[in-house]
Amino acid sequence: GGQKSRIAFAQIMWQKPHVLLLDEPTNHLDLHAVLWLEEYLQGWGKSLVVVSHARSFLNSVCTDMLHFYDGTITRYKGDYDTFETTRSDQLKQQGRASERVEAQRAHMQAFVDKNRGNASKASMAQSRLKAMSRLEVVAAIMDDPSLHFGFPEPEPLPTPILQLVDVGFNYPGKPALFQHVELGLDMESRVALVGPNGIGKSTLLKLILGELEPSSGEVKRHGRLRMGRFTQHHVDQLDLGKSALDSFLAMYPGTPPLEIRKHLGTMGMGGPEALQKMGTLSGGQKSRIAFAQIMWQKPHVLLLDEPTNHLDLHAVLWLEEYLQGWGKSLVVVSHARSFLNSVCTDMLHFYDGTITRYKGDYDTFETTRSDQLKQQGRASERVEAQRAHMQAFVDKNRGNASKASMAQSRLKAMSRLEVVAAIMDDPSLHFGFPEPEPLPTPILQLVDVGFNYPGKPALFQHVELGLDMESRVALVGPNGIGKSTLLKLILGELEPSSGEVKRHGRLRMGRFTQHHVDQLDLGKSALDSFLAMYPGTPPLEIRKHLGTMGMGGPEALQKMGTL
């Protein structure tokens, strides 16, 4: 998935876009690739419109939030954390204002009710009624819909509940992915697996689950251990012809439907969505159903492989909040740095056939790892300087009989010098977007735009938005509220129901959606795909371009279905 996503990004980069429209761009990228994408976009001075569930990604690359709520879109200056703080303050202020007005209204109504039959106070009561009619209606702003996750409590088990003893693994005919792995989990372990795609993180999850057997060593599990697993491909295994309720009843026949509906409700799926065929639901809704299936099992250990993919940001925040309070064991693979910081206390770093455990959250790991790289680099430089100094002495005195013994001694000393290899950092991706020509402001403008699908209520109305060459805008709000629709209006794939979308005549837009990978021709290689899109382009130029995404080697010639 990560390699296909990089090819899709490479296709965008080739277009020299003035505006990048990114719909869940971090899905299927490993964490290292996400960090490099963040780093590039921070330095890239062009316009961005982003939909993402990754809070740290939005904080890194966006300077404005467009918040979708109740048919309106409101612009907030600042990153996502600033928006959250501002929004929280607004909720409190509006709530207090609503309470004050309602207290006044209740006080006036009590006077009117008390004096309704009192002729002497009839005029005063009438006056209060008029005053009530003039009171401003201040509705308390409701927060975005909340998801209340609930994992039924499993029975306790003694420590360790799971243990890997000197475990190694390789696929047939392939070199070892890792060797000599030691890992013990108790009921409160919170472990993240970090490293590039393809290095063995998902393989380790399969070893823990028993889907694979180790090539060496042993995996020990407590006899009553239950594990719940959610993978980034879990949604593909749902029977889309069934409803969530029917799917549960097929898995657990005899269970009262009301009990299942109540359980699905903890994931925001207990209403009419529970009765719809799952093929008609959004990616986020399908992911919630998959989570509900996990929650039903009362797991001692949750194995989460990219759990935030397809969840909207609000759902991710609620999942973080629940997992922070849930006291059971987690093993997580995720590209979302803020998610790892929130829910994990240990990092297992996959590198060069080894797996090293680091205490602390992801930011602590990054700092520790950076310090190690610097220290090991300095140690390597010192040893190499000593070696070079000795070698120079030997070379200088090779034919000098009087210094032959000293030269021989230096040779022996060189052979005893410890080889200190500088630790190389994880493979880097160097993103490069060819520079587009400048355009005058605004390059794109939405003027009093509204939109509704036929026969449906308006998703939003009276939207005003202007983009220049340096706008960095995130679209935030629950799934299904219109964020992807606004992207389609910007692109011209949809026409507004009211208002106007104005685009500069030479404006080029690059778009990456969470479904972009599905549109690749998996029977072709990345190189052949580019040549079909841009016939006559020198293959070497395309290979060089793909190389900026770490796809310029043999991967460029492989069929994309094998990536």
Image (cartoon, helix red, strand yellow):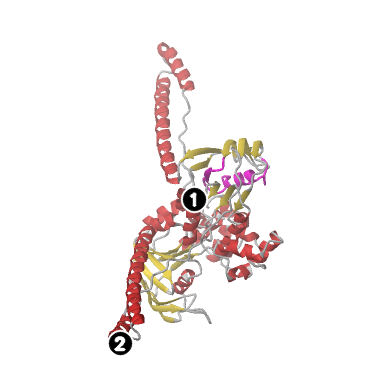
Q: Position of residue 366 (x, y in %)?
A: 43, 43
Q: Residue at x 48, y 21 (%)?
A: 416
Split into 4 quadrants, where in the image is the C terminus?
bottom right
Residue in front for this viewpoint, 306 or 7: 306
Q: Residue at x 49, y 50 (%)?
A: 325
Q: Which mark is residue 89?
A: none
The reply to whether callout 2 and callout 1 are in contact (CB within 8 Å) is no
- Mark 2 or 1, nearer chain start: 2
State the CA–CA distance, disc 2 to disc 1.
58 Å
- For disc 2, the marked residue is 122
- For disc 1, the marked residue is 325
- Determine whether, in the image, residue 493 is placed left or right of residue 46: right
* Mark 1 secondary-structure assignment: helix
**Magenta residues (range):** 186-213
Task: Residue 17: say if magenta.
Answer: no
**Residue type indicated by callout 2:** Ala
Q: Residue at x 59, y 37 (%)?
A: 160
Q: Position of residue 114 (x, y in %)?
A: 35, 80
10 Å crowding of disc 2: few (<14), some (14-19), many (20+) = some
Q: Position of residue 455 (x, y in %)?
A: 53, 82
Query: Is 143 placed above or below 363 here?
Result: below
The reply to whether residue 520 is in sight is no
Displayed quadrant of residue 259: bottom right
Task: Residue 210: say if magenta.
Answer: yes
Displayed quadrant of residue 159: top right
10 Å crowding of disc 1: few (<14), some (14-19), many (20+) = few
Residue in front for this viewpoint, 1 or 124: 124
Q: Nearer the viewer, mark 2 or mark 1?
A: 2
- Determine whether, in the image, residue 476 is placed left or right of residue 158: left
Q: Position of residue 263 (x, y in %)?
A: 59, 61
* Mark 2 secondary-structure assignment: helix
**Residue type indicated by callout 1:** Gly
